[in-house]
Amino acid sequence: MSVVGEKLQPTVFELSRPGRGDGKIPHPPAGALDRIPAAARRATPLALPEIAEPEVVRHYVNLSALNYSVDTGFYPLGSCTMKYNPKLNEWAARLPGFAGLHPLAPDAMAQGTLQLLWELEAMLAEISGMTAVTLQPAAGAQGELTGILMVRAYHRSRGDLERTEVLVPDSSHGTNPATASMAGFKTITIPSAPDGGVDLDAFRAALGPKTAVIMITNPSTLGLFESRIGELLEATHAAGALAYMDGANLNAILGRFRPGEAGFDVMHFNTHKTFSTPHGGGGPGAGPVGVREALEPFLPEPRVLREPDGSFRLERAGERPTSIGRVRSFFGSTGVLVRAYAYLRAHGGSGLREVSDDAVLAANYLKALVGQAYEVPFDRPCKHEFVASAAGLKHRTGVRTLDIAKRLIDKGYHPPTIYFPLTVEEAMLIEPTETESLETLDAFAAALVEIAHEAETDPGLVTSAPHVAPVRRLDEATAARQPNLRWRGVTGLETPCPQ
Ligand SMILES: *Cc1c(COP(=O)(O)O)cnc(C)c1O
Protein backbone atom coordinates (compact mmCIF):
# COMPACT_ATOMS: atom_id res chain seq x y z
CA MET A 1 0.00 0.00 0.00
CA SER A 2 1.27 3.45 -0.77
CA VAL A 3 0.95 6.20 1.79
CA VAL A 4 -1.29 8.86 0.29
CA GLY A 5 -1.32 12.05 2.32
CA GLU A 6 -2.16 15.55 1.24
CA LYS A 7 1.22 16.17 -0.38
CA LEU A 8 1.98 12.60 -1.24
CA GLN A 9 0.83 10.97 -4.38
CA PRO A 10 0.15 7.51 -5.77
CA THR A 11 3.18 5.37 -6.56
CA VAL A 12 4.37 5.22 -10.12
CA PHE A 13 2.73 1.78 -10.36
CA GLU A 14 -0.64 3.17 -9.37
CA LEU A 15 -0.29 5.89 -12.02
CA SER A 16 0.22 3.23 -14.66
CA ARG A 17 -2.35 2.95 -17.48
CA PRO A 18 -2.11 0.37 -20.28
CA GLY A 19 -0.57 1.81 -23.42
CA ARG A 20 0.60 5.11 -21.90
CA GLY A 21 4.29 4.27 -21.96
CA ASP A 22 4.29 2.87 -25.45
CA GLY A 23 7.25 3.51 -27.68
CA LYS A 24 9.73 4.45 -24.97
CA ILE A 25 11.28 1.02 -24.48
CA PRO A 26 12.72 -0.37 -27.73
CA HIS A 27 11.39 -3.82 -28.62
CA PRO A 28 13.94 -6.55 -29.38
CA PRO A 29 14.31 -7.51 -33.07
CA ALA A 30 11.95 -10.22 -34.25
CA GLY A 31 13.13 -13.67 -33.23
CA ALA A 32 15.71 -12.36 -30.72
CA LEU A 33 13.97 -14.07 -27.83
CA ASP A 34 14.07 -17.45 -29.60
CA ARG A 35 17.81 -17.61 -28.98
CA ILE A 36 17.28 -17.54 -25.18
CA PRO A 37 16.56 -21.00 -23.72
CA ALA A 38 12.90 -21.39 -22.80
CA ALA A 39 13.74 -22.15 -19.17
CA ALA A 40 15.48 -18.78 -18.81
CA ARG A 41 12.56 -16.81 -20.30
CA ARG A 42 9.80 -15.14 -18.24
CA ALA A 43 6.46 -16.86 -18.32
CA THR A 44 4.73 -13.48 -18.05
CA PRO A 45 6.05 -10.06 -19.12
CA LEU A 46 7.69 -7.88 -16.47
CA ALA A 47 5.13 -5.65 -14.77
CA LEU A 48 6.70 -2.28 -15.57
CA PRO A 49 4.51 0.76 -15.03
CA GLU A 50 3.17 2.31 -18.21
CA ILE A 51 3.29 6.05 -17.90
CA ALA A 52 4.12 9.00 -20.16
CA GLU A 53 7.43 10.79 -19.78
CA PRO A 54 6.11 14.12 -18.38
CA GLU A 55 4.20 12.20 -15.68
CA VAL A 56 7.36 10.29 -14.76
CA VAL A 57 9.37 13.50 -14.47
CA ARG A 58 6.71 15.24 -12.36
CA HIS A 59 6.31 12.18 -10.16
CA TYR A 60 9.97 12.05 -9.20
CA VAL A 61 10.57 15.79 -9.03
CA ASN A 62 7.60 16.16 -6.66
CA LEU A 63 8.86 13.29 -4.54
CA SER A 64 12.32 14.89 -4.36
CA ALA A 65 10.75 18.12 -3.08
CA LEU A 66 9.51 16.20 -0.01
CA ASN A 67 13.10 15.58 1.07
CA TYR A 68 14.61 17.64 3.84
CA SER A 69 18.29 18.32 3.37
CA VAL A 70 21.05 20.61 4.54
CA ASP A 71 20.64 22.38 1.19
CA THR A 72 17.03 23.23 2.05
CA GLY A 73 17.22 24.04 5.75
CA PHE A 74 18.94 23.88 9.13
CA TYR A 75 19.80 20.34 10.19
CA PRO A 76 20.79 20.35 13.88
CA LEU A 77 21.17 16.59 14.23
CA GLY A 78 23.60 15.98 17.10
CA SER A 79 26.46 13.50 16.70
CA CYS A 80 26.14 13.65 12.91
CA THR A 81 27.86 16.96 12.01
CA MET A 82 25.38 17.93 9.30
CA LYS A 83 27.39 20.84 7.98
CA TYR A 84 26.95 22.44 4.59
CA ASN A 85 28.91 20.51 1.96
CA PRO A 86 30.67 22.82 -0.51
CA LYS A 87 29.65 22.13 -4.11
CA LEU A 88 33.29 22.38 -5.18
CA ASN A 89 33.82 18.95 -3.59
CA GLU A 90 31.11 17.49 -5.81
CA TRP A 91 32.89 18.87 -8.87
CA ALA A 92 36.17 17.36 -7.70
CA ALA A 93 34.69 13.93 -7.01
CA ARG A 94 33.10 13.87 -10.46
CA LEU A 95 36.30 14.66 -12.38
CA PRO A 96 36.51 11.88 -14.97
CA GLY A 97 40.04 10.89 -13.92
CA PHE A 98 38.74 10.00 -10.44
CA ALA A 99 35.15 8.98 -11.14
CA GLY A 100 35.98 7.01 -14.28
CA LEU A 101 39.04 5.15 -13.01
CA HIS A 102 38.57 1.40 -13.28
CA PRO A 103 39.02 -0.16 -9.82
CA LEU A 104 41.37 -2.76 -11.31
CA ALA A 105 43.45 -0.24 -13.31
CA PRO A 106 47.16 -0.98 -13.07
CA ASP A 107 49.14 1.30 -10.76
CA ALA A 108 50.76 3.09 -13.71
CA MET A 109 47.33 4.26 -14.90
CA ALA A 110 46.12 5.24 -11.40
CA GLN A 111 48.97 7.53 -10.34
CA GLY A 112 46.74 10.60 -9.74
CA THR A 113 44.30 8.75 -7.50
CA LEU A 114 47.08 6.95 -5.65
CA GLN A 115 48.88 10.26 -5.04
CA LEU A 116 45.66 11.85 -3.75
CA LEU A 117 45.12 8.94 -1.35
CA TRP A 118 48.73 9.05 -0.19
CA GLU A 119 48.54 12.79 0.46
CA LEU A 120 45.18 12.45 2.22
CA GLU A 121 46.69 9.83 4.54
CA ALA A 122 49.51 12.24 5.35
CA MET A 123 47.09 15.12 6.05
CA LEU A 124 44.95 12.99 8.36
CA ALA A 125 48.08 11.79 10.17
CA GLU A 126 49.15 15.38 10.72
CA ILE A 127 45.69 16.48 11.94
CA SER A 128 45.45 13.57 14.38
CA GLY A 129 49.06 13.20 15.54
CA MET A 130 49.01 9.57 14.38
CA THR A 131 51.90 7.98 12.45
CA ALA A 132 49.99 6.12 9.75
CA VAL A 133 46.46 6.03 8.32
CA THR A 134 44.37 3.58 6.33
CA LEU A 135 41.61 5.00 4.14
CA GLN A 136 39.86 1.71 3.45
CA PRO A 137 36.97 1.48 5.96
CA ALA A 138 33.58 2.39 4.52
CA ALA A 139 32.39 4.47 7.49
CA GLY A 140 33.04 5.21 11.16
CA ALA A 141 31.52 1.95 12.36
CA GLN A 142 33.74 -0.09 10.06
CA GLY A 143 36.69 2.06 11.09
CA GLU A 144 36.01 1.07 14.69
CA LEU A 145 35.96 -2.60 13.73
CA THR A 146 39.19 -2.18 11.76
CA GLY A 147 40.84 -0.44 14.72
CA ILE A 148 39.74 -3.03 17.26
CA LEU A 149 40.83 -5.90 14.98
CA MET A 150 44.28 -4.27 14.87
CA VAL A 151 44.27 -4.05 18.67
CA ARG A 152 43.40 -7.76 18.82
CA ALA A 153 46.23 -8.58 16.40
CA TYR A 154 48.63 -6.50 18.50
CA HIS A 155 47.88 -8.35 21.74
CA ARG A 156 48.01 -11.71 19.96
CA SER A 157 51.37 -10.85 18.39
CA ARG A 158 52.73 -10.43 21.92
CA GLY A 159 51.25 -13.71 23.08
CA ASP A 160 48.92 -11.75 25.38
CA LEU A 161 45.75 -13.81 24.97
CA GLU A 162 43.99 -12.97 28.23
CA ARG A 163 42.74 -9.55 27.17
CA THR A 164 39.09 -10.18 26.38
CA GLU A 165 37.40 -6.97 27.56
CA VAL A 166 36.71 -3.54 26.05
CA LEU A 167 35.85 -0.65 28.35
CA VAL A 168 33.20 1.72 26.95
CA PRO A 169 31.60 4.73 28.70
CA ASP A 170 27.80 4.65 29.09
CA SER A 171 27.47 7.78 26.92
CA SER A 172 29.12 6.09 23.94
CA HIS A 173 27.57 5.66 20.51
CA GLY A 174 25.95 2.25 20.01
CA THR A 175 28.55 1.32 17.42
CA ASN A 176 31.25 1.10 20.14
CA PRO A 177 29.82 -1.90 22.03
CA ALA A 178 28.64 -3.38 18.72
CA THR A 179 32.21 -3.21 17.42
CA ALA A 180 33.60 -4.80 20.57
CA SER A 181 31.23 -7.72 20.33
CA MET A 182 31.79 -8.19 16.58
CA ALA A 183 35.51 -8.44 17.28
CA GLY A 184 34.82 -11.10 19.90
CA PHE A 185 35.31 -8.97 23.02
CA LYS A 186 33.15 -8.48 26.06
CA THR A 187 31.94 -4.89 26.64
CA ILE A 188 32.32 -3.43 30.11
CA THR A 189 30.23 -0.26 30.49
CA ILE A 190 31.72 2.54 32.58
CA PRO A 191 29.27 4.99 34.20
CA SER A 192 29.57 8.74 33.74
CA ALA A 193 30.46 11.07 36.61
CA PRO A 194 28.01 13.90 37.46
CA ASP A 195 30.06 16.32 35.31
CA GLY A 196 29.39 14.13 32.23
CA GLY A 197 32.95 12.78 31.99
CA VAL A 198 34.07 9.20 32.59
CA ASP A 199 33.88 8.23 36.29
CA LEU A 200 37.57 7.74 37.06
CA ASP A 201 37.09 5.48 40.10
CA ALA A 202 34.71 3.18 38.25
CA PHE A 203 37.11 3.19 35.32
CA ARG A 204 40.10 2.23 37.48
CA ALA A 205 38.09 -0.53 39.13
CA ALA A 206 37.19 -2.06 35.75
CA LEU A 207 40.65 -1.70 34.21
CA GLY A 208 43.04 -4.65 34.54
CA PRO A 209 44.97 -7.47 32.89
CA LYS A 210 41.82 -8.50 30.99
CA THR A 211 41.39 -5.08 29.37
CA ALA A 212 42.33 -5.09 25.69
CA VAL A 213 41.37 -1.52 24.88
CA ILE A 214 39.32 1.42 26.08
CA MET A 215 37.11 3.29 23.61
CA ILE A 216 36.69 6.96 24.39
CA THR A 217 34.72 9.52 22.38
CA ASN A 218 36.33 12.91 22.76
CA PRO A 219 34.61 15.30 22.88
CA SER A 220 31.97 12.92 24.18
CA THR A 221 28.49 12.43 22.80
CA LEU A 222 27.39 14.95 25.45
CA GLY A 223 29.48 17.53 23.60
CA LEU A 224 31.93 17.74 26.51
CA PHE A 225 35.69 17.55 26.37
CA GLU A 226 36.90 14.62 28.49
CA SER A 227 38.75 16.66 31.11
CA ARG A 228 40.40 13.62 32.79
CA ILE A 229 41.84 12.34 29.53
CA GLY A 230 45.43 12.44 30.86
CA GLU A 231 44.63 10.20 33.84
CA LEU A 232 42.51 7.85 31.70
CA LEU A 233 45.28 7.30 29.16
CA GLU A 234 48.01 6.94 31.75
CA ALA A 235 46.07 4.33 33.71
CA THR A 236 45.21 2.48 30.49
CA HIS A 237 48.79 2.16 29.33
CA ALA A 238 50.02 1.28 32.83
CA ALA A 239 47.57 -1.64 32.71
CA GLY A 240 49.02 -2.83 29.38
CA ALA A 241 45.87 -1.92 27.43
CA LEU A 242 45.53 0.32 24.39
CA ALA A 243 43.37 3.40 23.92
CA TYR A 244 40.95 3.89 20.99
CA MET A 245 39.46 7.27 20.22
CA ASP A 246 36.10 7.48 18.51
CA GLY A 247 36.82 10.49 16.31
CA ALA A 248 33.26 11.20 15.17
CA ASN A 249 33.38 14.52 17.03
CA LEU A 250 36.64 15.68 15.48
CA ASN A 251 34.81 18.73 14.13
CA ALA A 252 35.21 20.30 17.58
CA ILE A 253 38.97 19.92 18.01
CA LEU A 254 40.69 20.41 14.65
CA GLY A 255 43.94 22.26 15.20
CA ARG A 256 43.38 22.25 18.98
CA PHE A 257 43.81 18.65 20.15
CA ARG A 258 45.79 15.87 18.48
CA PRO A 259 44.70 12.47 19.83
CA GLY A 260 47.96 10.72 18.87
CA GLU A 261 49.99 13.34 20.71
CA ALA A 262 47.75 12.99 23.77
CA GLY A 263 48.47 9.24 23.90
CA PHE A 264 45.66 7.54 21.97
CA ASP A 265 46.96 4.52 20.02
CA VAL A 266 44.26 4.35 17.35
CA MET A 267 41.28 6.39 16.18
CA HIS A 268 38.83 6.67 13.33
CA PHE A 269 37.73 9.70 11.34
CA ASN A 270 34.26 10.12 9.85
CA THR A 271 35.24 12.03 6.73
CA HIS A 272 31.57 12.40 5.74
CA LYS A 273 30.94 14.25 9.01
CA THR A 274 34.05 16.32 9.63
CA PHE A 275 35.30 16.76 6.09
CA SER A 276 31.97 17.29 4.33
CA THR A 277 30.27 14.63 2.28
CA PRO A 278 26.46 14.70 2.06
CA HIS A 279 25.33 11.88 4.38
CA GLY A 280 21.74 12.57 5.35
CA GLY A 281 20.54 9.66 3.28
CA GLY A 282 22.85 7.24 5.04
CA GLY A 283 25.91 7.05 2.87
CA PRO A 284 28.30 6.33 1.37
CA GLY A 285 30.85 7.54 3.88
CA ALA A 286 34.47 6.83 4.69
CA GLY A 287 36.03 5.90 8.02
CA PRO A 288 39.83 6.19 7.80
CA VAL A 289 41.75 4.88 10.80
CA GLY A 290 44.93 6.40 12.19
CA VAL A 291 47.41 4.45 14.33
CA ARG A 292 50.66 5.04 16.19
CA GLU A 293 53.83 2.97 15.59
CA ALA A 294 52.80 -0.05 17.67
CA LEU A 295 49.80 -0.79 15.47
CA GLU A 296 51.27 0.15 12.08
CA PRO A 297 52.30 -3.43 11.14
CA PHE A 298 48.66 -4.52 11.41
CA LEU A 299 47.10 -1.92 9.07
CA PRO A 300 44.80 -3.37 6.40
CA GLU A 301 46.38 -4.21 3.07
CA PRO A 302 47.00 -2.91 0.52
CA ARG A 303 48.60 0.33 1.69
CA VAL A 304 49.51 3.02 -0.82
CA LEU A 305 53.32 3.13 -1.06
CA ARG A 306 55.57 5.79 -2.48
CA GLU A 307 58.60 4.48 -4.36
CA PRO A 308 62.01 6.18 -4.19
CA ASP A 309 61.44 7.55 -7.72
CA GLY A 310 58.30 9.37 -6.49
CA SER A 311 55.79 7.05 -8.16
CA PHE A 312 53.01 5.37 -6.20
CA ARG A 313 51.91 1.77 -6.01
CA LEU A 314 49.56 -0.46 -4.05
CA GLU A 315 51.03 -3.08 -1.75
CA ARG A 316 50.79 -6.57 -3.23
CA ALA A 317 48.67 -9.22 -1.51
CA GLY A 318 50.70 -10.93 1.20
CA GLU A 319 53.56 -8.40 1.00
CA ARG A 320 53.08 -7.55 4.72
CA PRO A 321 52.13 -10.77 6.54
CA THR A 322 51.28 -8.97 9.82
CA SER A 323 48.37 -7.11 8.16
CA ILE A 324 44.83 -7.88 9.36
CA GLY A 325 43.98 -8.14 5.63
CA ARG A 326 41.55 -6.25 3.46
CA VAL A 327 38.51 -4.65 5.07
CA ARG A 328 37.00 -3.12 1.92
CA SER A 329 37.26 -3.68 -1.81
CA PHE A 330 39.61 -1.65 -4.03
CA PHE A 331 40.63 1.80 -2.71
CA GLY A 332 37.74 2.31 -0.25
CA SER A 333 35.01 4.95 -0.83
CA THR A 334 37.19 6.90 -3.26
CA GLY A 335 34.59 9.54 -4.16
CA VAL A 336 34.13 10.41 -0.50
CA LEU A 337 37.91 10.54 -0.02
CA VAL A 338 38.27 12.95 -2.97
CA ARG A 339 35.69 15.22 -1.31
CA ALA A 340 37.62 15.11 1.97
CA TYR A 341 40.84 15.94 0.14
CA ALA A 342 39.21 18.89 -1.64
CA TYR A 343 37.78 20.15 1.66
CA LEU A 344 41.12 19.89 3.45
CA ARG A 345 43.01 21.62 0.65
CA ALA A 346 40.42 24.40 0.47
CA HIS A 347 40.68 25.13 4.20
CA GLY A 348 44.33 24.54 5.03
CA GLY A 349 45.59 24.30 8.60
CA SER A 350 44.41 27.67 9.89
CA GLY A 351 41.07 27.27 8.11
CA LEU A 352 40.45 23.96 9.87
CA ARG A 353 41.18 25.47 13.25
CA GLU A 354 38.68 28.20 12.41
CA VAL A 355 36.09 25.53 11.49
CA SER A 356 36.37 24.06 14.97
CA ASP A 357 36.43 27.38 16.78
CA ASP A 358 33.30 28.55 14.93
CA ALA A 359 31.50 25.24 15.53
CA VAL A 360 32.20 25.50 19.27
CA LEU A 361 31.16 29.15 19.37
CA ALA A 362 27.89 28.39 17.53
CA ALA A 363 27.07 25.53 19.91
CA ASN A 364 27.70 27.59 23.04
CA TYR A 365 25.66 30.48 21.65
CA LEU A 366 22.73 28.22 20.83
CA LYS A 367 23.04 26.48 24.19
CA ALA A 368 22.61 29.81 25.98
CA LEU A 369 19.46 30.63 23.97
CA VAL A 370 17.90 27.17 24.31
CA GLY A 371 18.73 27.24 28.04
CA GLN A 372 16.06 29.95 28.45
CA ALA A 373 13.32 27.35 28.05
CA TYR A 374 14.90 23.91 28.63
CA GLU A 375 17.36 22.40 31.08
CA VAL A 376 20.95 22.14 29.88
CA PRO A 377 22.24 19.53 32.34
CA PHE A 378 25.98 20.16 32.25
CA ASP A 379 26.93 23.55 33.51
CA ARG A 380 30.20 24.04 31.67
CA PRO A 381 31.06 25.21 28.17
CA CYS A 382 30.29 22.64 25.51
CA LYS A 383 32.26 21.80 22.41
CA HIS A 384 30.51 21.41 19.04
CA GLU A 385 27.17 20.15 20.41
CA PHE A 386 25.14 20.21 23.61
CA VAL A 387 22.41 18.26 25.35
CA ALA A 388 19.18 19.93 26.36
CA SER A 389 16.48 18.12 28.32
CA ALA A 390 12.71 18.48 28.27
CA ALA A 391 12.33 16.47 31.50
CA GLY A 392 10.95 19.45 33.47
CA LEU A 393 8.54 20.39 30.70
CA LYS A 394 7.31 16.79 30.52
CA HIS A 395 6.59 16.66 34.24
CA ARG A 396 4.70 19.97 34.11
CA THR A 397 2.79 19.59 30.83
CA GLY A 398 3.04 16.00 29.59
CA VAL A 399 4.81 17.21 26.43
CA ARG A 400 7.75 14.96 25.64
CA THR A 401 10.88 15.40 23.59
CA LEU A 402 9.32 13.36 20.78
CA ASP A 403 6.44 15.86 20.62
CA ILE A 404 8.85 18.78 20.47
CA ALA A 405 10.70 17.10 17.61
CA LYS A 406 7.44 16.62 15.69
CA ARG A 407 6.38 20.22 16.32
CA LEU A 408 9.74 21.46 14.99
CA ILE A 409 8.78 19.88 11.64
CA ASP A 410 5.73 22.20 11.53
CA LYS A 411 8.06 25.15 12.06
CA GLY A 412 10.23 24.13 9.12
CA TYR A 413 13.13 22.47 10.92
CA HIS A 414 14.67 19.05 10.93
CA PRO A 415 14.53 17.88 14.57
CA PRO A 416 17.74 17.42 16.53
CA THR A 417 18.86 13.97 17.70
CA ILE A 418 16.44 12.84 20.41
CA TYR A 419 16.67 10.34 23.29
CA PHE A 420 20.44 10.12 22.83
CA PRO A 421 22.70 10.00 24.75
CA LEU A 422 20.75 7.52 26.84
CA THR A 423 22.16 8.96 30.06
CA VAL A 424 20.05 12.15 29.87
CA GLU A 425 16.28 12.04 30.41
CA GLU A 426 14.18 13.42 27.50
CA ALA A 427 17.40 14.37 25.71
CA MET A 428 17.81 16.57 22.66
CA LEU A 429 21.34 16.53 21.25
CA ILE A 430 21.82 19.69 19.20
CA GLU A 431 24.74 20.36 16.87
CA PRO A 432 24.58 23.57 14.83
CA THR A 433 28.01 23.25 13.09
CA GLU A 434 30.13 26.16 11.90
CA THR A 435 28.25 26.68 8.66
CA GLU A 436 25.07 28.27 10.06
CA SER A 437 24.48 32.01 10.27
CA LEU A 438 23.66 33.95 13.43
CA GLU A 439 20.16 34.59 12.05
CA THR A 440 19.53 30.87 11.54
CA LEU A 441 20.66 30.06 15.07
CA ASP A 442 18.44 32.83 16.50
CA ALA A 443 15.41 31.66 14.51
CA PHE A 444 15.87 28.01 15.49
CA ALA A 445 16.24 28.88 19.18
CA ALA A 446 13.13 31.07 18.94
CA ALA A 447 11.19 28.12 17.49
CA LEU A 448 12.26 25.86 20.36
CA VAL A 449 11.37 28.51 22.96
CA GLU A 450 7.99 29.04 21.26
CA ILE A 451 7.27 25.31 21.44
CA ALA A 452 8.00 25.35 25.17
CA HIS A 453 5.40 28.16 25.53
CA GLU A 454 2.90 26.21 23.42
CA ALA A 455 3.46 23.21 25.70
CA GLU A 456 2.50 25.32 28.71
CA THR A 457 -0.54 26.98 27.10
CA ASP A 458 -1.85 24.46 24.56
CA PRO A 459 -0.11 21.10 25.05
CA GLY A 460 -2.49 19.32 22.65
CA LEU A 461 -1.14 21.43 19.80
CA VAL A 462 2.32 19.99 20.43
CA THR A 463 1.37 16.41 21.24
CA SER A 464 -0.65 16.13 18.00
CA ALA A 465 2.09 17.60 15.78
CA PRO A 466 3.11 17.54 13.01
CA HIS A 467 0.18 19.36 11.45
CA VAL A 468 1.60 20.42 8.10
CA ALA A 469 3.89 17.50 7.19
CA PRO A 470 2.99 15.09 4.35
CA VAL A 471 2.36 12.37 6.90
CA ARG A 472 1.31 12.69 10.54
CA ARG A 473 2.57 10.47 13.34
CA LEU A 474 3.81 7.13 12.17
CA ASP A 475 3.81 3.89 14.07
CA GLU A 476 7.58 4.08 14.54
CA ALA A 477 8.02 0.66 16.12
CA THR A 478 6.28 -1.09 13.23
CA ALA A 479 8.06 1.12 10.70
CA ALA A 480 11.42 0.08 12.18
CA ARG A 481 10.65 -3.60 12.73
CA GLN A 482 8.50 -4.43 9.73
CA PRO A 483 9.38 -1.84 7.12
CA ASN A 484 7.25 -2.13 4.02
CA LEU A 485 9.58 -0.80 1.36
CA ARG A 486 8.72 -2.82 -1.73
CA TRP A 487 5.96 -2.54 -4.26
CA ARG A 488 4.14 -5.85 -4.60
CA GLY A 489 2.12 -5.57 -7.75
CA VAL A 490 0.75 -8.43 -9.78
CA THR A 491 2.87 -9.65 -12.65
CA GLY A 492 1.41 -9.59 -16.08
CA LEU A 493 0.41 -7.12 -18.72
CA GLU A 494 -2.60 -5.80 -16.82
CA THR A 495 -2.17 -2.64 -14.74
CA PRO A 496 -0.64 -3.57 -11.40
CA CYS A 497 -2.99 -2.76 -8.58
CA PRO A 498 -2.25 -1.94 -4.95
CA GLN A 499 -2.38 -4.77 -2.46
C1 LIG B 1 28.44 8.72 13.66
C2 LIG B 1 29.11 8.11 14.82
C3 LIG B 1 29.68 6.82 14.75
C4 LIG B 1 29.49 5.89 13.57
O1 LIG B 1 29.97 6.41 12.39
P1 LIG B 1 29.34 6.03 10.96
O2 LIG B 1 30.22 6.77 10.02
O3 LIG B 1 27.93 6.51 10.97
O4 LIG B 1 29.44 4.55 10.81
C5 LIG B 1 30.38 6.37 15.84
N1 LIG B 1 30.50 7.12 16.95
C6 LIG B 1 29.95 8.34 17.07
C7 LIG B 1 30.14 9.12 18.33
C8 LIG B 1 29.22 8.88 16.01
O5 LIG B 1 28.65 10.08 16.12
Image (cartoon, helix red, strand yellow):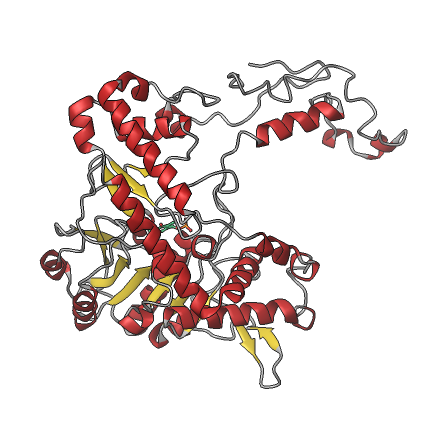
Q: Report the residue at 69% width, 57% height from top.
A: 100
Splitting the image into 4 quarters, where does residue 427 fall? top left
The C terminus, quarter of image = top right
Rendering quarter of residue 424:
top left
Q: Position of residue 467 (x, y in %)?
A: 41, 19
- Does any portion of residue 420 appear in the rendered image? no
Q: Residue 439: where, in percent of width, then height?
A: 41, 43
The answer to whether residue 450 is visible is: yes
- Closer to the camera in the image, 267 or 415: 415
Q: Nearer the viewer, residue 333 or 163?
A: 333
Give the side of residue 135 with respect to residue 177, left or right: right
Quadrant of residue 426 in the image? top left
Outermost residue toward the right?
30
Instruction: Decide which of 126, 255 is in the foreground and name it.
Output: 255
**Coordinates of residue 403 in the picture (x, y in percent):** 31, 26
Residue extending farthest to the bottom is: 308
Q: Is residue 375 left or right of residue 178?
A: left
| Viewer-closest of 151 and 319 | 151
Total residue callouts: 0
Question: At x 27% / y 40%, what residue is drawn?
Answer: 370
In the figure, 258 relative to 483: above or below? below
Residue in view at x 34 percent, y 32 percent: 447
Residue 248 image position (x, y, % from top left): 37, 55
